Each structure stands twice: as C-alpha cells, then as structure tokens.
Amino acid sequence: IALPQPSLSIRWNEKADKKFLLAALEGDGARQSSVAASAGSLTDVIADGINTLAADAFGDIILEEIDGIYTVIEDYEEEIRGAMNNGN
C-alpha cells in the first residue's frame, strides 16, 4: 500500500517522536522505553501521538503494539524508512 504524498512531510511534535519511530522500525522495546523516559513520557503516549499525526496526515495509523513493543505496521515500513532517511 503506497502512502499518499502528505505522509512524507509529517511534522513531528518532538525529537522524541522521531527517535521512538526509529526504535519502532527496529522493534527495539528497550530503546522505546528509554526514549519515552528521557522525554518524561510513556511509550503508549508517544505511540498514540505518532499515530494521531499519521492519521491526520493520511488517514491511518503506522504503529501497532505487539507483545508490549511498538512496531511500524508492515505495509508502511518501506515508506516510513524512506521518509526518515530523507530527514522528515
């Protein structure tokens, strides 16, 4: 499933969002927890914020929780990696 163009220009709320999303791409639950703690937040709060931004940008969420670790939904992995590599 290809993401609409607006997905490539999501304006992240905080640097923690990008760090958390990178950890989600790698399936790194420990890093997700560390990012959340450094931001004075919880993993669920950051993931919900990212999903809200994604839903507002293109009408769908991009993170799902599996066994307590957030991962990028498989259909969106390639597009999200590309957007992250391009500095978005």
Image: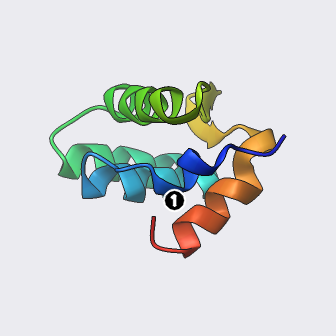
Q: Single out the residue that lies furthest toward the left.
A: 40
Rendered image quadrant of residue 36: top left
Helix, strand, or loop for circle 1? helix
Quick check: 10 above or below 66? below
Residue 28 visible? The answer is no
Looking at the picture, the colour scheme in use is rainbow
At which x and y percent is residue 4?
A: 67, 43
Question: Which residue is found at the position 29% from the left and 53% from the top?
Answer: 16
Rendered image quadrant of residue 41: top left
Q: Single out the residue that lies furthest toward the right.
A: 1
Q: Quadrant of the C terminus?
A: bottom left
At which x and y percent is residue 19?
A: 39, 59
Q: Amino acid at mark 1?
A: Leu
Residue 57 visible? The answer is yes
The residue closer to the viewer here, 68 or 79, is: 79
Question: Which residue is found at the position 52% from the left and 46% from the top?
Answer: 29
Q: Single out the residue that lies furthest toward the front.
A: 5
Question: Which residue is found at the position 49% from the left and 51% from the top?
Answer: 21
Give the total of numbered labels. Answer: 1
Quick check: 50 above or below 60? below
Question: How dense is the environment of label 1, judged by Cα within 10 Å: few (below 14), some, or many (20 and up)?
Answer: some
At which x and y percent is residue 58?
A: 58, 33
Q: Quadrant of the N terminus?
A: top right
Q: Single out the residue that lies furthest toward the bottom.
A: 86
Q: Which residue is mark 1?
A: 22
Rendered image quadrant of residue 43: top left
Question: Which residue is found at the position 24% from the left and 51% from the top?
Answer: 14
The residue closer to the viewer here, 69 or 46, is: 46
- Side of 20 relative to 86 (left or right): left
